[in-house]
Image (cartoon, coloured by chain):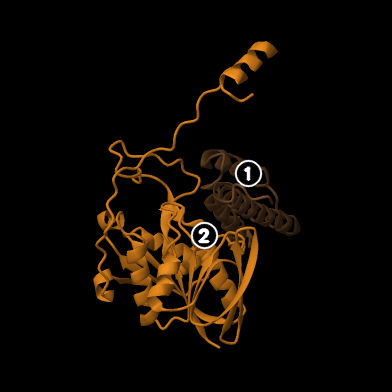
Chain colours: A orange, B brown
Amino acid sequence: MALRALVGVKRVIDYAVKVRVKPDKTGVVTDGVKHSMNPFCEIAVEEAVRLKEKKIVSEIIAVSCGPQQCQETIRTALAMGADRGIHVDVSAKDSETLGPFQVSKILAALAKKENANMVILGKQAIDDDCNQTGQMTAALLDWPQATFASEVKVEGDKLTVVREIDGGLETISMNLPAVVTADLRLNEPRYATLPNIMKAKKKKIESVKPADLGVDTASRIQILSVEDPPQRQAGVKVETVEDLVSKLKESGCI
Amino acid sequence: MANPLRGEVVKLYKNLLYLGREYPKGEIYFKERLKKAFMKNKDVTDPEKIKELIARGEFVVKEIEALYYLRKYRAMKQRYYEDDPK
């Protein structure tokens, strides 16, 4: 059994960074802000690496779409255990409007080109929270999909996946090739250590343009406005119980 | 000077420095403490003792990795699984 896994990784603003909206409301500030791999993509990479360690997967290809800096994200995936990388070069300006639809077309084209048997993605990215790429990739490839995976088992050319659904778990079985999207509880991603990052520098990252894959990255979506969530109202201190009761009555709580 | 374990100690120090870049309390805070911890043992010459100290350093590396993982996991859980009864 020699499966090939294609893993999508996205470069996003680091989860620990406080995101700020640009004054002109066209987006968020990304210049000089720390970026890292989307946490759900890390889980996807980890799952692929674990399948490789179980000798189920023979090769892991990490793909990222975006500007030059995406190569760092691919490098992290390579340090975690992916075999080689593909960087789909989209200029910084175009990547702002690059949505799940365009990315899924790129991933589908690459999955065919690389003869992948499995596409593993994070369920969603923490920047746009779209949760669409995996589903659309499966549709474009006409492959079965297992979204929100919390356990993945491969037996022959069958895939058994436990999915996280509202109020419980669902176990489904499907044929390979398939698309899997990782949920938070699928595994505990390993840390890309310094020695491994150094070793990963020897691994190859191929660079391709979306046009080479026959994909048009023009977006059909127009961003009207990006705004901060509403600010929490400041509280008040009350001196006595009577004050508290009257305030509560005023606000209609009692 | 050229202790055979020198390379390993340097490697450990570099690994820890790299890990410190993400430390929640800031890189500078981490670096100061890291340097102090290494300088405290700079006069140790007994190979057994050095090995023991390296093992302790590697344990700290594991602990920090676990800390980062948990921190990220909790942040994700809080943001995306808010009304989870678990």
Quadrant position of the C terminus of chain A in the picture: top right
Disc 2 residue type (three-letter): Phe
Q: Position of residue B18 (x, y in %)?
A: 52, 52
Q: Is residue A249 above or below residue A27?
A: above
- The residue singled out by tag 1 in the image is B39
State the quadrant of the N terminus of chain A: bottom right
> Where is residue A20 shown, x and y percent of the image?
39, 39
Position above or below: A240 against B24: above
| Of residues B63 and B86, the one drawn nearer to the viewer in this rendering | B86
A254 shown above or below A131? above
Instruction: Output the chain of dot 1.
Output: B
Residue that numbered label 2 is attached to: A40
Mark 2 or mark 1, which is nearer to you?
2
Q: Secondary structure at mark 2?
A: helix
Residue B51, located in which quarter of the rendered image?
bottom right
Closer-to-camera residue (A4/A205): A4
| Disc 1 packing (10 Å; few <14; some 14–19; many ≥20) | few
Query: Distance of mark 2 from mark 1, alpha carbons?
Result: 39 Å
Q: Going by the image, does B41 lie left or right of B18?
A: right
Q: Chain of mark 2?
A: A
- The answer to whether residue A201 is seen in the rendering is no
Residues B20 and B57: in front is B20
Q: Position of residue A177 (x, y in %)?
A: 48, 81
Which percent across, then down, holds residue A241?
Answer: 69, 13
For residue A119, the mark is none
Residue at position x 41%, y 83% from top? Answer: A115
Three-letter amino acid code of the residue under disc 1: Met
